[in-house]
Image (cartoon, rainbow, N blue to C red):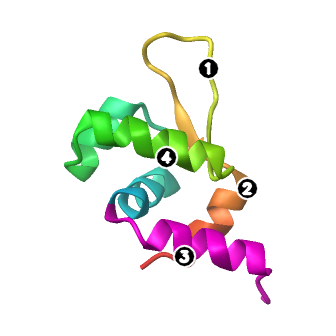
Amino acid sequence: MDLSDEMLMEIYYVKTSKIRNKIMKTLKREVKIPSKISDDTKIGRNHVSKALGELKDHGLVECINPEMRKGKLYRLTEKGKIVSRYLS
């Protein structure tokens, strides 16, 4: 599959951060709350929250219950699923 320049830039964006890379990989398997992402990746919760916001801004992850104050669930978007295939 030929990737667009935009997709190549998104893959590069994720690969240039160990934190973003780990979060994308853990979300590839299942929908998770930030504390579970933090536990699974051994990344501090504040870093997870910041990275999730950045990934959301790039259209790579989405919160499926944004109205909740606690227990927000995150998953990869379709774009995020494509990007995650190219992560090592």
Q: Which residues are magenta?
A: 1-18
Question: Where residue 7 sits in the image (x, y, percent)?
Answer: 71, 73
Q: Nearer the viewer, mark 3 or mark 1?
A: 3
Q: Nearer the viewer, mark 2 or mark 1?
A: 1
Q: Are marks 4 and 3 in contact (CB under 8 Å)?
A: no
Of helix, strand and loop, which mostly describes the magenta segment? helix
Q: Which residue is mark 3?
A: 12
Residue at horizontal 28 percent and vertical 40 percent from the top: 38
Q: Which residue is mark 2?
A: 78
For label 4, count other residues whose C-alpha is less than 10 Å away and answer few (under 14), some (14-19) or many (20+): few
Q: Is residue 82 left or right of residue 17?
A: right
- Look at label 4 and name its amino acid: Glu
- Point out the tag, 3 or 1, that comes first from the N-terminus: 3
For mark 2, give the secondary structure.
helix
Closer to us: 85 or 56: 56
Q: Are marks 3 and 1 in contact (CB under 8 Å)?
A: no
State how far apart marks 4 and 3 are (Cα). Answer: 23 Å
